[in-house]
Amino acid sequence: MNAFTVAKFGGTSVADHAAMSHCASVIEENKTTRLVIVSACSGVTNLLVELSNGVDCPLMQQTIISKIAEIHFDILARLPDAPDVKNQIHAILDQIKTLSISVLDVPSSKITDSLVACGELMSSHIFTHLLNAQAIKARFFDVRQVLKTDANYGKATPNLELISQYAQELLIPLCKEQVVVTQGFMGSDSLGNTTTLGRGGSDYSAALLAEAIQADILEIWTDVPGIYSTDPRIASQAKPISEISFNEASEMANFGAKILHPATLLPAMRRNIPVFVGSSQAPKLGGTWIRHQAQASPLFRALALRCNQTLITLTSLNMLHAYGFLANVFNILAEHKISVDLITTSEVSVSLTLDQTNTCGGAPMLPKEVEKALEKLCRVTVEQDICLVALIGNKMGESRGGAAKIFGALKDYNLRMICYGASNHNLCFLTHTNEAKDVVRALHKELFE
Ligand code: ASP
Ligand code: MG
């Protein structure tokens, strides 16, 4: 085989029969596609998360499970009858029911992971059947055999060595025979328990598998034709980007551009696998290539917006001309596995935002015990209702006049915090939620239109 393409289809791409059929055409068009990773059908993970939060009213619980069943049986109804696939879906639905009940007795992130992973299991069974019905020889593969992780349920860390080993042993031989369809988002720990990589983790799964099978191209198929200079729903003048570097794209993902999961690009970068992002509904519209080096590296590339930020400010008069304060703060955060995102310091205080990729979404909370531990060192203030606006570009520190344009565009807005300098590729602002979209629009107008 010359080239080897891994294609990942997101939730909207596999939302229903019509959407799945578009994905089948994408696979048909590119004969080098050997491994296909699917998300759960659109909306299904949210319903499963609802169940995992504990729905104790039996009627409500049944309503949610029926909704999930309907989404999948609607697709099956449009395909040739396949009793074995139907049985698989019934068995998974039974499991959803059992898990939804057991989570009421003992809420646990372990049960949550087994529950939310059911979405990907169902979509992948059905998509395999759809491919075969369209004469694309395909087989279902349970990714838990290969995608090995630790037991940090809800946000498991992949074990790269094992993934690579099992991919060589189990996956590559199968890919040589036919198209292999497997699940994104989920994996398993050393005991075989189901784990997940965090919400939106299917992109990351696809990249990890592409790395492990040493693919030549990774395609991420979604509902938009590639990456834009900002979210077109916020600024209607947003422009498509045909090619972008790994560095710029990972900054965008980190800072909330919804199109890619933040961790996605790391495996692709490690093996230098070009990544294509496009729309499965409209592949002819083209998309964005993400490569090690893009031909153009403009000063301003894109704007990303991430809401639901939690800003923590730690103030200690003892910090004045002292040493060790930051070390103590970060030791406490590290002990509690709290990941920090933006940070800025003054002589007597430090402000930081909390990282927020976990299975449940929403604004990250500072756990009470961490707050207590920090309060022994300093005064702790927690602010919410804050958004992060990130301007992504190249060599912004070396340009003259760039700053005047940026701050000129922002003259009517309140900036709660500014971070710049650690990376040449981004300049970040925190703003209050009610102004955030206006800030993005104002900057987009000044810098990109
Ligand atoms: N289905 C999972 C989610 O909605 C994973 C993914 O789609 O990437 O978060
Ligand atoms: Mg998704």
Image (tube, helix red, strand yellow):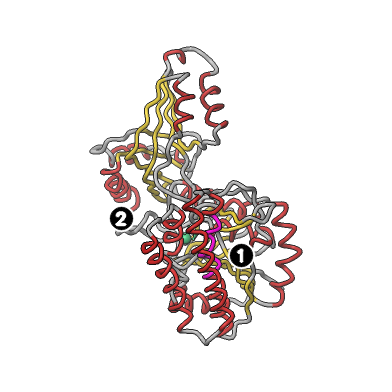
Residue 142: quadrant of the picture: bottom right
Whether pointer 2 and pointer 1 mark residues with C-beta atoms closer than 8 Å, the reply is no
The disc label shown at residue 252, or none: none
Is 116 inside the magenta-drawn segment? yes
- Point out the stretch of residues depicted in magenta: 113-122
What secondary structure predominates along the stretch shown in magenta? helix
Instruction: Report the Cα–Cα distance between label 2 and label 1.
Output: 31 Å
Q: Is residue 224 visible?
A: no
Residue 205: quadrant of the picture: bottom right
Residue at image location 72% in from the left, 54% down from the top? 162
**Horizontal and vertical percent for residue 168?**
74, 63
Say which quadrant the C terminus sits in. Answer: bottom left
Q: Nearer the viewer, residue 444 or 161?
A: 161
The disc label shown at residue 217, or none: 1
Q: Nearer the viewer, residue 170 or 104?
A: 104
Secondary structure under tag 2 reads loop
Q: Is residue 182 above or below residue 80?
A: above
**Horizontal and vertical percent for residue 242?**
47, 62
**Horizontal and vertical percent for residue 368?**
44, 31
Q: Is residue 127 visible?
A: yes
Please rate how many residues cluster around mark 2, counting C-alpha atoms within 10 Å: few if below 14, some from 14 to 19, many from 20.
some
Residue at image location 33% in from the left, 33% down from the top? 416
The disc label shown at residue 235, or none: 2
Residue at image location 54% in from the left, 33% down from the top? 336
Q: Nearer the viewer, residue 107 or 16?
A: 107
Secondary structure under tag 1 reads strand
Say which quadrant the N terminus sits in. Answer: bottom right
Amino acid on which disc 1 is placed: Ile
